[in-house]
Amino acid sequence: MPSDQPSHVLAALASPRYLISEWPWRALLSVLTALPVIGVAALLLSPVTLPWAGWLVQLAEGGMHTAPLVVVSGLATAVLAMFGTLLAAPFAALERRRLGIVDPRPVDRAPRAGSVGSWFAARYAAPAAWRELLFLVLLATVAPLAYATLAFAVFTVGILIISPLLVVKDGKDLAGVANAITLGPWQITTPAQAIPYVLLGLVLLPPLAYLTGLLAAGHAATARVLLGGGGQAELREVARSRTRLVDAFDAERRRIERDLHDGAQHRLTSMTLQLGVARLDLPDDSPAAAALDRAHAEAKDLMVLLRDLVHGISPQTLADLGLPAALRDLATRSPLDVTVSVEPGVADRYPSRVENTAYFAASEALGNVAKHAGAASAAVRLARHGDTLVVEVRDEGRGGADPARGTGLTGLADRVAAVGGRLLLSSPAGGPTLVRVELPCLP
């Protein structure tokens, strides 16, 4: 069953459940945390923006002495071109982190520079650095106007709601001073007159929540476009197929596991014991002793191989302890240095089809890292956003993963899609690579 849970605030705005979901509060948090960032950006760029604003005002008024302002504006712009990409870097890093408040989807970034010198060179040569500067300019110019509009709307609605407190009795405040509120052609002088305006303010709260969400969504969309990896390796959804029936697949998997464990593995164990007993009955100088030793050793190796195969089909840790413990066990058995982080809110147990798919996705992704990425380490993150379980596998390898080249990603996407989830891939040339699996975790 496909998940209908919105994964970001823009999708949530189209949902009829927006007002009773967590998204209005997340949008409000995004707006509030943006205010100091915008203030600092506007202050830092004021030596550039103020001369240009003064020049535009003079030009609009038909001023004849605008040449000094043009010179100052040009010099300020030249300085911004020289140092602006360096200044934009910390703002871009902060905005990528803030983006997760209203849009947890991963952001594809430009490849990291190998040294301090190459980083400085990239701040002028890489197109991504100039897009970060453009984002900083938008923070200092357009964003204050947009957020000021929202602040005015919040202020107006707030005045409407608390208007009875501003006019206490007979047009006088608590100190007995004559008091009144003027709203356009209307004037409020008594608390009774303020009641319709209170009701109007309450009615305007839902539109205000949508306005906050639209502003947060616009800010996030701009950040995603300008602060991504520049189109070199766009985050894309791997082609999916819904032709597999997940229940039939799980039933077949359990049948194979049972047949291997109760049939082949049991018989192989018995054969290995019989070979060992037969070897004890032979003297060391017997011609058959060496052949029996080799057969006994091969039988034991085959037992280990079969045990690993059964474990890969259905790991006992997953069945007994749940997904977080199974992922940690998977990390210890990986040839890579794998760190596993489980965010708060993640439960130990989920429906079996979700647990099996999440485990298989992490196992397949780590296998791809070991075979193709050329990385020494990887990181697995397990999180939950609403009713969606998220598994991310990240490595700092060579990148350039392509589902069309047979790396198993298309098959993995098929399996994820069978439970109503989706697989997202970000793998620019030079790395890092991020595989993100989103699974609906409702029973």
Image (cartoon, grey):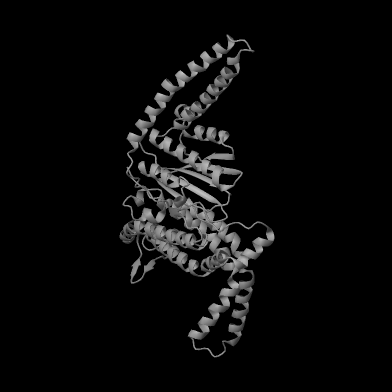
Q: Residue 194 at what x, y percent from top left? A: 34, 60
From the viewer's side, name the closer residue of 38 and 313: 313
Residue 168 visible in the current orientation: no
* Quadrant occupied by the C terminus: top left
From the viewer's side, name the closer residue of 334 and 324: 334
Q: Quadrant of residue 301?
A: top right
Vertical placement of residue 275 versus 215, above or below:
above
Q: Residue at x 53, y 15 (%)?
A: 275
Total label count? 0
Q: Residue 383 at what x, y percent from top left? A: 48, 42
Q: Residue at x 65, y 65 (%)?
A: 121
Q: Residue 88 at what x, y percent from top left? A: 59, 64
Residue 373 visible in the current orientation: yes
Q: Residue 101 at what x, y percent from top left? A: 48, 52
From the viewer's side, name the closer residue of 77 and 59: 77
Q: Classify residue 188 as left or right of residue 435.
A: left
Q: Quadrant of residue 264?
A: top left
* Quadrant occupied by the N terminus: top left
Residue lying at the far bottom of the rendered structure: 64
Vertical placement of residue 169 versus 260, above or below:
below
Q: Classify residue 394 as left or right of residue 192.
A: right
Vertical placement of residue 163 versus 83, above or below:
above
Residue lying at the far front of the rendered structure: 287
Residue lying at the far top of the rendered structure: 281
